[in-house]
Amino acid sequence: MSLPPLEDLVACSQCDTLHNAMTLSEGETAACRQCGTPLMTSRSSALARVLSLALTSVVLMIAAISFPFLDLDVQGRQSGTSVIGAVLAFQSSWGFPLAIAVAGFIIILPLTRLIALIYAIGPLTRGAKPRRYARQAFALAERLRPWSMVEIFMVGVTVALIKVAGLATVTIGPAFWAFAALVVITVLKDQLICRYSIWEELDTARA
């Protein structure tokens, strides 16, 4: 039994099960038969929604690193910090590698991924020809996806706040809510994006 050409196969991003690519009607979605992960979609507005969510994420990221994150009040002694302040707190000689890791995983890599995604799919939402190096930009965005750890950061912060709440008065700042909104929007964006369709459009334009 001969296998179909590789370009006609779609691999599930979660379980790597191979499926035959198919033409979908408007509004239809194809899911993995093994784990149910969405594989393909045929929504003309999906790319525009992904682009708008990516742009919103950039704005929220800028807000998250610009505004105060939280304030602590311990027996009348107040202390506030921001995300940048938390990174700079590790700038001593021994903590410098940790500062680089924190800045990279929660600021630099997520922003780089968003900018690469916007660069790659921006013209596609208008039906225009992709920009030069659009395929490389989208590939970069996909490679950085596992390393963008904003949601892991929020889980860690939430656990820490639960433990600190009994020892001090905690006032949550705008940056905390910006990060929380960023996590929700990232989940929505990853659910809407159809990677197979984007690769198909980029390959067709290149050909």
Image: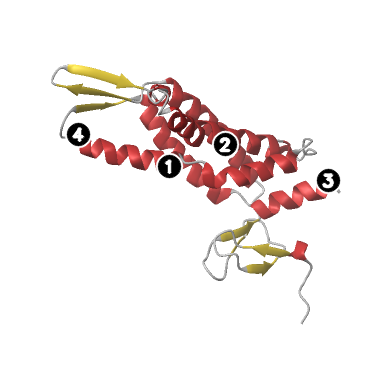
Question: SS of the residue at dot 1?
Answer: helix
Estimate the spatial distance between the alpha carbons at disc 1 and disc 3, rounded to whole Å: 35 Å
Judge depth for marks 4 and 2 and give the one in front. Answer: 4
Question: SS of the residue at dot 3?
Answer: helix
Residue on which the image places disc 3? 206
Judge depth for marks 3 and 2 and give the one in front. Answer: 3
Q: Amino acid at mark 2?
A: Ala
Residue on which the image places disc 4? 165
Judge depth for marks 4 and 3 and give the one in front. Answer: 4
Question: SS of the residue at dot 4?
Answer: loop
Mark 2 or mark 4, which is nearer the start of the sequence? 2
Query: Which quadrant would residue 179 be assigned to in this image?
Result: top left
| Residue 52 can be seen in this image | no
Mark 1 or mark 2, which is nearer the start of the sequence? 2
Q: Amino acid at mark 3?
A: Arg
Residue on which the image places disc 1? 151
In the rendered structure, find residue 54 and report the number of the disc placed on it: 2
Residue at the front extreme of this rendering: 93
Q: Amino acid at mark 4?
A: Ala
Q: Residues within 10 Å of mark 1 (few under 14, many from 20)?
A: some
Q: Is residue 49 left or right of residue 122?
A: left
Quick one: 192 or 77, which is closer to the camera?
A: 77
- At x 64% / y 39%, what residue is drawn? 117
Judge depth for marks 1 and 3 and give the one in front. Answer: 1
Q: Is residue 119 left or right of residue 81?
A: right
Q: Residues within 10 Å of mark 4 (few under 14, many from 20)?
A: few
Q: Residues within 10 Å of mark 2 (few under 14, many from 20)?
A: many
| Residue 82 can be seen in this image | yes
Location of residue 99 in the rendering, given as x and y in whole percent from the top left corner: 44, 29
Estimate the spatial distance between the alpha carbons at disc 4 and disc 3, rounded to whole Å: 55 Å
- At x 42% / y 30%, what residue is drawn? 178
